Amino acid sequence: MSGADAAAAPGAVSHPPVHCHHFSAGRCGSCTLMGTPYRVQLQRKDAVVRDLLAAQVPATAWEAPLASVPEGFRTKAKFVVSGSAAAPTLGILDEAGRGVDLRDCGLHVPELAAVADRLARFVTRAALPPYDLARRRGELKHLVLTAAPSGDLMLRFVLRTEGPLPRIREHLPGLLADLPQLRVVSANLHPEHKATLSGEVEIALTEQTLLPLELPGVTLFAGPGAFVQTNTTVAAALYQQATAWLVDAGARRVADLYCGVGGFALHAAAAGTEAVGVEIAADAVRGARAGAAALTQRPGGGAARFVVADASDPAAVLAAAGTDRDAMVVNPPRRGLGPDLPAMLDARSPAADPASALRTLVYSSCNPATLATDLAGLPHWQVRSARLFDMFPNTDHAEVVVLLEPRTATLGG
């Protein structure tokens, strides 16, 4: 039995192949591994990341991969809206720029699937003309729908201009009455003609502006523009793994770089450490601070604070977190840590500076290729443990987390 057979979501590895009529018909190719048995997907993905990281991660460091269920896991739907107000499509655009309706996408959790049709009817009722990418006219570009573990929802309208706002506001009470689980609604203004999901201006349409995401022992709070993992079950396991490593290493003062809404920092704080998170996105920090406030209300809840600063800038990191951190978690975007941060982290290894307080690094990566590059830039650190978390089944995407210790020291030494 391979390592991919262990540590799986119940029944996930033995799950029969997932089939999608959109994929079979050639309408959507996003899930490149669709139809491949999940056991095979996980084994192949695990083998690929082990091979890619072989120069930096010893074979003995790898733990069994964490599996997902292969369908009904995605808690966020990013619908491109096309067609017409009378007959909108919610999904993606094909190569010719035509809308492909994916309201019945099998990856979505049931809470999203159950309301997609009602959102389409709202587009018709409020007469919201979808944006025509080729002709550069129309208004509604995207609908972004997020589900919390509680079943509560957050909806974001991405608009070209403020023009449709009066109609959205007029019909919104009816939508809220129809969907009482819809707690947070906003409109984002995205006037530019470019392939990005949102613009800079966010307009709250409900009194509540943050969606609570209840995880074991911690509640995260997400605003409309904040990044959150879209596989909540696997994300919770990822946070728990990193926290277990930190606790086992004896960490007491943790810095979480690229912290987003505070997932790693809040879990570390709940485990008894004093944590600080550093994140450049102010809306994400707003949510992280709400999570820190909620944590203080839990019995035995710990302390965490969050700073708006550029986590890729070593000077900004040290100013925000101080120089006495004995553990750091880094969770960068796909591009990795950037040109400057690895040098600072490497210089702060006790193997390079015996007076340094830093004893433990945890690197959570959504791109194993840039992880390999960054690990190569940390010669005074060595990987002690590594694990694949299958955040996106049916694709080649791999989330990998590694635990590093000083190359010439032991954890806690």
Image (cartoon, helix red, strand yellow):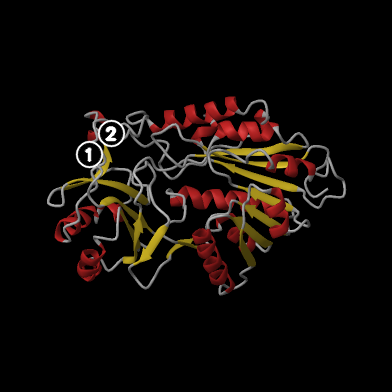
Q: Is residue 168 visible?
A: yes
Amino acid type assigned to the residue bearing label 2 in the image = Cys
Q: Amino acid at mark 1?
A: Val
**Between discs 2 and 1, the one toward the N terminus:** 2
Classify residue 61 by image quadrant. top right
Q: Which of the 4 image quadrants contains residue 60? A: top right
What x and y, as percent, mark residue 72?
33, 46
Q: Is residue 149 visible?
A: no
Q: Are marks 2 and 1 in contact (CB under 8 Å)?
A: yes
What is the quadrant of residue 10 in the picture? top left
Q: Residues within 10 Å of mark 2 (few under 14, many from 20)?
A: some
Which mark is drawn over residue 387?
A: none
x, y (%) of residue 97?
Answer: 24, 35
Q: Which mark is residue 28?
A: 2
Q: Residue at x 64, y 26 (%)?
A: 54
The residue beneath circle 1 is 100
Q: In 3D space, how far apart are the residues under numbered discs 2 and 1 (Cα atoms)?
A: 8 Å
Q: Quick check: 409 left or right of 372?
A: right
Vertical comparison of 52 with 413: above or below: above
Residue 319 vertical position relative to residue 30 in the rendered view, above or below: below
**Circle count:** 2
Rendered location of residue 17, percent (x, y): 33, 32
**Which percent across, then down, holds residue 21?**
22, 34
